[in-house]
Amino acid sequence: MLRARDTEIAVMAVRWSAAHASLGVMLFWLGVLAAVGCSTNAERSVTRDGAAGNLSPGDTMRIHFERTGGFAGLRLTVDIETDTLSQEDQRRLQQLVEEADFFTLPAELRDTSTAKDQFVYRVTVEKAGMRHTVETTESAAGPLLQPLLEWLTRAARRRT
């Protein structure tokens, strides 16, 4: 169970990261790791050995992506099953999920910014018996998650 001190550390790291860019991002992730290590979040799933495991040939990764907000308040969504993609897109999408360390991210990534007209992203990834959802604001996504969000945004635009 998440202890109050771990939550306090994570909140302090988020606030500090908004003001101190790259060093703040590093401290934010340290706070996240401390909080996740003590969490029993039912939605956070990993394989038995504690690793997020790779897709085997024939496995399908399912992704639901939703982007809302922005200046016009538009909603952009897409549902993707990797077995419907080219092999190149399958590899790239899996690489982006792994590089973001998606299955270890907290369910919510928010910053203290009061910036208006930000996009809000909600991404659910299912693979190899695991399912995890992350909701984040545009400014809180961070450099590891941002490439995945950009890829999914382009995919959603192509399908509309």
Image: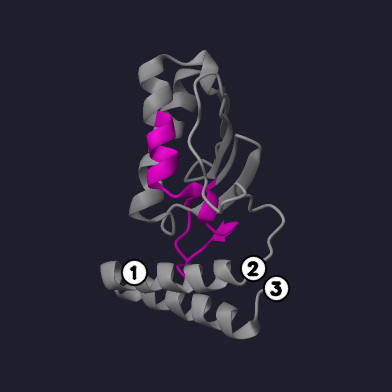
Q: Secondary structure at mark 1?
A: helix
State the image quarter where residue 158 is shown. top left
Amino acid on which the number 2 mark rests in the picture: Ser
State the image quarter where residue 18 is shown. bottom left
Total marks placed: 3
Which is more foreground, mark 1 or mark 3?
Answer: 3
Q: Which mark is residue 39?
A: 2
Which residue matches tag 1? 26
Residue 44 shows up from this direction: yes
Membership of 95 in magenta stretch: yes
Which residue matches tag 3? 1
Q: Position of residue 121 (x, y in %)?
A: 53, 46
Name the residue rendered at 60%, 46% in the picture.
Answer: 47
Cα gap from disc 1 to disc 2, whole angstroms: 20 Å
Above or below for 61 versus 159 = below
Q: Position of residue 12 (x, y in %)?
A: 47, 81
Above or below for 45 versus 108 = above
Location of the N terminus (image quadrant) = bottom right
